[in-house]
Amino acid sequence: MPAAGPGPVTVAPEVRARLGILVVTAEMGTLTRDLRLVGRVVPAETARRTVASRVDGFVERLAVDFTGRPVHRDEVLLELYSPMLVAAQQELLLAVRLRSALGTGSTADAARNADSLVAAARRRLQYWDISDDQIAELERSGTVRRTLTLRSPSDGVVLQKNVVQGQSVAAGAPLFEIADLGTVWLEADAFEDDLAAVRVGQVADASFDAYPGEVMRGRVAYVYPTVDPASRTGKVRVELANAGGRIRPGLFGTVRISAPGVRGVVIPRQAALVTGDRQLVFVEDSANRFQPRLVELGAENDSLVVVKDGLRAGERVVSAAAFLLDAESNLGAAMAGMAGMAGMTPAPAPHGPTKR
């Protein structure tokens, strides 16, 4: 059977109300839509710090002894006993005493060599994170310190603690990971067709089940350049101020981002019928008939859709019960196609039996 296209449908005025057919006028307008994304709170990577020792040693005193503990900048984390550190301090004191013993009667070369030894011993301690004040105190007092004090590099919370009291520590091993939670990131997932509408700097409103009815405002700080091949989503980073520490890492939240407006011919979403590769609307003509028309749809929100091609502003389209017209239109087209086919004409009425 040849494919028959949909045809116009005529509905009597008294039948329209009974079928619930509503007609609206297509208008030029700007369609705005809100993207709703779901994500998880993570500490800001730029505010994370790792504390490690630059010398081998043993933990003699552990001041911060559990994960999740808040710490302040320059607060003592632990004291590390290091034989290497003790030996380096003794070398510095020996170089200082040697320079003093030379006195004023020494040659210029001997004085320069003594100064070089002192400077080299100081640099060695500086490379191990011994401050200039501590080095000056060592030279003044002449007393060797047994331990190296490691302090917090910033305010924050201990996310990881990889050390216990009395443990031996290797140079470079990460001992603590500390994050300043004054600013956190909410990393949300955006579908492929929404990524183009997200821009850095857009206002983003976040809400959390932990704080019902409360909206926390942030901004889109980064749109990741990759897409997850399994979920077909891309990551969007929203930066949120967290002065009170209420937004905790690990919380799941919903983000609402207002996408840029799209201008065009706007109709209700239910007025457009999408079936397979077909997008159509029913347009009312001057003869009170409903003519199906193929269109090309664009951006949409919860209630409206933009018609990119096939419809002009001012034309009237069916906004309710369009599916009934579509069914009637296709049925009428199919019946018309069948009527014109060979072999589909009505059969003649049979004659009664012939008498002999």
Image: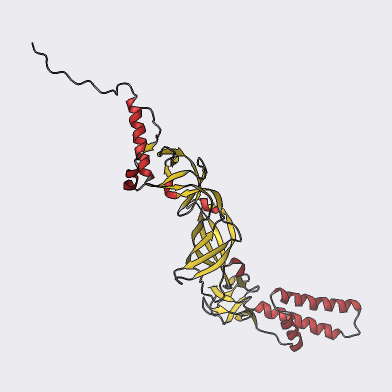
Q: Depth check: 220 or 95 in front?
A: 220
- Where residue 245 sits in the image (x, y, percent)? 53, 75
Residue under the image location 81 percent in, 83 percent down: 98
Q: Quadrant of the N terminus?
A: top left
Q: Residue furthest bottom?
A: 141
Residue under the image location 61 percent in, 71 percent down: 49
Task: Note whether residue 140 is visible.
Answer: yes
- Where residue 186 sits in the image (x, y, percent)? 53, 65
- Where residue 18 sits in the image (x, y, percent)? 31, 47
Residue 123 drawn above or below residue 314: below
Q: Quadrant of residue 62?
A: bottom right
Q: Quadrant of the C terminus?
A: top left
Q: Depth check: 3 or 162 in front?
A: 3
Q: Depth check: 135 or 42 in front?
A: 42
Q: Residue furthest left?
A: 356
Q: Depth check: 216 or 328 in front?
A: 328
- Where residue 229 sits in the image (x, y, percent)? 50, 50
- Tell me if 326 is positioned left or right of 78 in this view: left
